[in-house]
Image (cartoon, grey):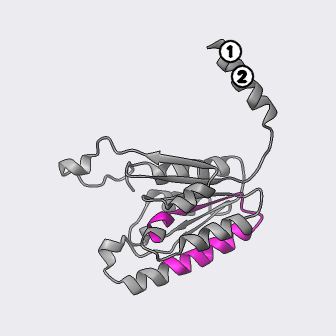
Amino acid sequence: MAKKKAARDKIMATKTDEKGLVIVHTGKGKGKSTAAFGMIFRHIAHGRKCAVVQFIKGGMETGERDLIGRHFGELCEFYTMGEGFTWETQDKKRDIEMARAAWKKAKELIRDPDNKMVLLDEINIAMRYDYVPVEEVVEFLREEKPPMTHVVLTGRNAKDELIDLADLVTEMELVKHPFRSGVKAQIGVEW
């Protein structure tokens, strides 16, 4: 055990590179956006400018949007670009238009060197339905993302191309959820 720790410490001591990461939170479990917002709040706490683009959750009030807008707007721009979950809107053409507009705003925010982190909340859903082509996202992140900017992409069903590009991927696993027992989404837990 001590040998493993020493080897790990040696590796850690030699790895001193600093770079902007591409971070993916995916999977069927709860907590993808929650974990990503935790990183946004860490950036705010350190006085670092950041931005959020919500691709899907536009049709609902969320605690994070309210809190950031009311108290931290000078450090974090917040854009809610979707109109709700795709199974609620039933207007594919409009969903595609909204996702494309969100992606355009996301690229603008990522290109801004003042933003140290940009959260693309639920973009994986937009890519899953081909509202935003995964190839375009991967190419942009590979070619145009500033080297010190962190980009966090959330949502179920992350595409393999995105996972291959990412520096850090976390898959949330659903073990148990109250929705399956007929309990609705709770304020402060889901939104």
Identify which amino acid the numbered label 1 is placed on: Lys
Residue at x 48% of width, y 64% of height: 124
The answer, for residue 68, to whether it is visible in the render is no
Does residue 185 lie above or below 146 as drawn? above
Question: In terms of image quadrants, where is residue 8?
Answer: top right
What segment carries the magenta color?
Answer: 99-126
In the rendered image, the quadrant that contains the C terminus is: bottom left
**Residue 153's quadrant in the figure?**
bottom right
Is residue 61 in the magenta section? no
Residue 32 rendering spot, x and y as whole percentages = 47, 51
Q: Is residue 30 visible?
A: yes
Q: Secondary structure at mark 2?
A: helix
Assign a secondary structure to mark 1. helix
x and y, in percent, of residue 127 in the image: 48, 70
- Which residue lies under the disc numbered 2? 7
User: What amino acid type is highlighted by mark number 2?
Assistant: Ala
Give the CA distance from mark 1 to mark 2: 6 Å
Query: Could you say where residue 95 lies in the image, as x and y percent from the top left?
Result: 42, 80
Q: Does residue 70 appear to the left or right of 126 in the view shown?
A: right
Furthest residue toward top: 2
- Compared to residue 170, the image places residue 108 above or below, namely below
Q: Is residue 118 magenta?
A: yes
Residue 3 is labelled as 1
Q: Residue at x 73, y 24 (%)?
A: 9
Residue 133, x across and y down, in percent = 53, 75
Q: Do residues under tags 1 and 2 come within 8 Å of each other at their CB atoms?
A: yes
